[in-house]
Amino acid sequence: MVVLPEPIQHTVVAIWDAYEARAASNGGDGRGIPMGSVANECERALWYALRWAAAPEVITGVKQRRFDTGNLEEERLLDDLENAGITVERVDPATGTQFRVELADGWLRGKMDGRATGVPEAPKTPHVIEIKSHNDKSFKELTKKKLREGKPDHYAQCQAYMRAETLTRCLYLAVNKNTDELYAERVEYDKAYAERLEAKVRRIVAADSAPAKLFDDPHAKAAWQCSWCPALPQCHEQQFARVNCRTCISFEFRPNAVGYCTHWDKELEYDEQQRGCDKHIYLPSLVPGEQIDANEAERTVTYQLHNGETWTDGLKL
């Protein structure tokens, strides 16, 4: 007997569709390197992301709802801090919106959860607030190893926020989503560490070619992070990068997070950078092959691709 499939739950489908539509309208490529990603030891991955080389992440309805749950938990934990007698600034008084912080000429960027005074361990010291929710496994790892070792990406985020805000302490508050247990840790500003983070971003921004691969074999046991890297096709599978202004040899990253086109001699808005133009010429390290010729007058570059074909970039047919 053939088993009939379960009927489609149209209400649930409609809910997920609505989440996905909202995610699509709010999504897209990041303007810079997020402070939450700067601890990634693979500078090549960060460079690809900054250059918009790979396809942007598709946010499913489930993932968007999970993001929303994290935001709701954040507000609840800020309420908890206020209920405990701690003074919390939730928005930037200069803008009336969430704190937006920048380093490295605007190319290292983040959104801070808030600032606090009256923390019981140091009532007079202003603190950056960083709030995270964890599943049970992640929470236990955090409480066992503490922040710097257990969650180095979160630790780096705290350090970047403190550097941007010129504060010396961060209050990291975490919740276990499975049990509602709480964990708080006061993080001390490490000036040398934070300076290295900013220098790392400046180095990535200034690079006209992709940094060295962290792993030659993405299937090696130690290279587990390669499997979920959006730039795996460009890094290891000889795929072309996307066509947009940031993958073009004429694009420059300038101070104050300004994207600039040297060919047209103009600043580029975000949407313009996304679209690119018909004068696009790839940065050589984004082409899966070796350069064998170039013609500056005709604005063409010829490559021997890894598949054996010869291909000329900029050739208009």
Image (cartoon, rainbow, N blue to C red):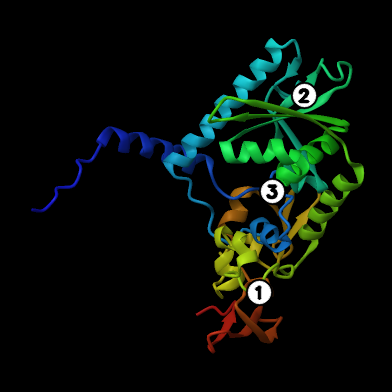
- Say if 57 sits above or below 237 in the image: above
Crowd band around label 2 with a 10 angstrom C-alpha radius: few (<14), some (14–19), many (20+)? many
- Say if 35 sits above or below 170 in the image: below
The mark total stands at 3
Give the residue drawn at x 70%, y 13%.
Answer: 82
Where residue 239 sits: x, y (%)? 54, 72
Q: Quadrant location of residue 85?
A: top right
Secondary structure of the residue carrying tag 2 is strand
Q: Which mark is residue 46?
A: none
Between label 3 and label 1, give the one nearer the viewer: 1
Alpha carbon of mark 3 to alpha carbon of mark 2: how far? 21 Å
Residue at which label 1 appears: 216
Secondary structure of the residue carrying tag 1 is loop
Amino acid found under the numbered disc labelled 2: Arg
Where residue 41 sits: x, y (%)? 73, 57
Give the residue drawn at x 64%, y 21%.
Answer: 77
Amino acid found under the numbered disc labelled 3: Ser
Give the residue drawn at x 88%, y 33%.
Answer: 166
Residue at which label 3 appears: 37
Crowd band around label 3 with a 10 angstrom C-alpha radius: few (<14), some (14–19), many (20+)? some
Alpha carbon of mark 2 to alpha carbon of mark 1: how far? 43 Å
Between label 2 and label 1, give the one nearer the viewer: 1
Q: Earlier in the sequence, mark 2 or mark 1?
A: 2
Alpha carbon of mark 3 to alpha carbon of mark 1: how far? 22 Å
Residue at which label 2 appears: 115
Amino acid found under the numbered disc labelled 1: Asp
Left or right position of 109 against 229: right
